[in-house]
Amino acid sequence: MSLPIHGQAPLLGIQDQHDQELQAVSSYLLDEDPNGIRIAAAIRRTYDMLLDGQHTGRYKWSQLHKTEKTHFGTLIEINLQREFKFTDGEKMDYSIDDIEVDCKFSQKLADWMIPPEAIGHILLGVWASDSQGIWSAGLIRAQEEFLTTSKGNRDGKRWLSKYGRSHIQWIYRDLQLPENALLHIPEEKVDLVFNCSEYGTKRIDMLFRLAQKRPISRTVVATVAQQDDFMKRIRGNGGSRSSLKPEGIVILGQYSSHREIAETLKLPAPGPGESVSVRLAIQKAHHGDRPYIELDAKRWVVALPEDPDETAPDLPRIIPVTNSKIN
């Protein structure tokens, strides 16, 4: 039996382990994104685009309209193409390494709807769950023997059969999705954040007060603030860093000095666009050998529940990077 030729529909019945085109696409994706970080970021962007939290205050899948959920797959296709700069296929969504590939997304694992025109072509199937914080992606050629025998829906679209699903080549399986913190904070705390005030600044204060020791992304801040200048609500001089200081709470940003503090205190280090809040206390005997940092000529540790509030220290000064030479 001959193997498929690039750019042509393959002969049906070729087993996936002998499918050279499928293996070539798999190798290409793994070379470009060995840890799945780029695909995960594209999925995260898709959720955030559709939720549009800055303007709607929405942060979870159930808040989307039915038509928006239907549009999710199209946005995944677009964002993956932007991320990897795939060229358009002649018949399918992409041309990857000169091979026609169709992109599919489903809300249930491997529940991709396969149109008649995709029969014989390779599918890049994606699944994600924002609530579970995981995603998967696999490859399969849409062969007749892998599809349900029914006529499908009114457009003739069918699904993979149980036998077909067993032939998916999973190249990324149950990997971590960049976190939407609002889905992992107890619901009663999220309600407190959104209901505490009509003012974005107060809601941001409550967010960093209740969601300590976890990375908070720019998108989450925008969703809570629902204002154009949302990042200003974190800063000192009137932002949350100032208003939470009397409670002993500091907000660490993506800066190297802040990341060092987080790492020393065994906290998650903020990544690009992220912030991490934590309540500090001056080191005392009952803190034992807990890790500490030195600021304002004092030793500070992560506060225990029984520690009283103490005015937080000033964080290291952030010096902007300029193009000027230092004399």
Image (cartoon, rainbow, N blue to C red):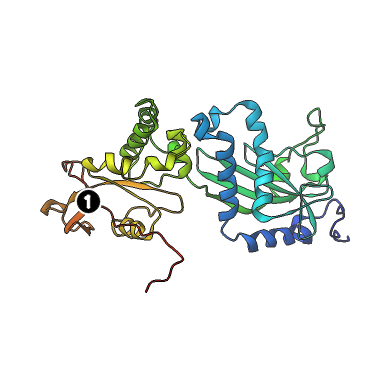
Look at label 1 and name its amino acid.
Pro
- Circle 1 residues within 10 Å: few <14, some 14–19, many ≥20: many
In the image, taking residue 31 as reference, residue 160 lies left or right, namely right
Relative to 67, does residue 87 appear above or below in the rendering?
A: below
Asked if residue 111 can be seen in this view, the reply is no
Which residue lies at the image location 31% right of the left edge and 43% below the top edge? 237
Q: Nearer the viewer, residue 12 or 259?
A: 259
User: In the figure, residue 196 lies in which quadrant?
Assistant: top left
Image check: 135 left or right of 304? right
Q: Secondary structure at mark 1?
A: loop
**Residue at the location (45% across, 39% down)?**
229
Residue 297, relative to residue 81: is it above or below?
Answer: below
**Which residue is most to the left?**
285
Instruction: Specify the quadrant that holds the C terminus.
Output: bottom left
In depth, the one of 35 and 225 nearer the eye is: 225
Number of on-image labels = 1
User: Horizontal placement of 311 versus 57: left or right?
Assistant: left
Image coords of residue 312 (percent x, y)? 22, 47
- Is residue 95 visible in the rendered image? The answer is yes
User: At which x and y percent is residue 2?
Assistant: 88, 61
In the rendering, at what x and y percent does residue 189 appear? 35, 31
Q: Where is residue 310? Give x, y as percent.
A: 17, 44
What residue would you read off at disc 1?
313
- Which quarter of the rendered picture does the N terminus lie within? bottom right
Q: Quick check: 155 above or below 293?
A: above
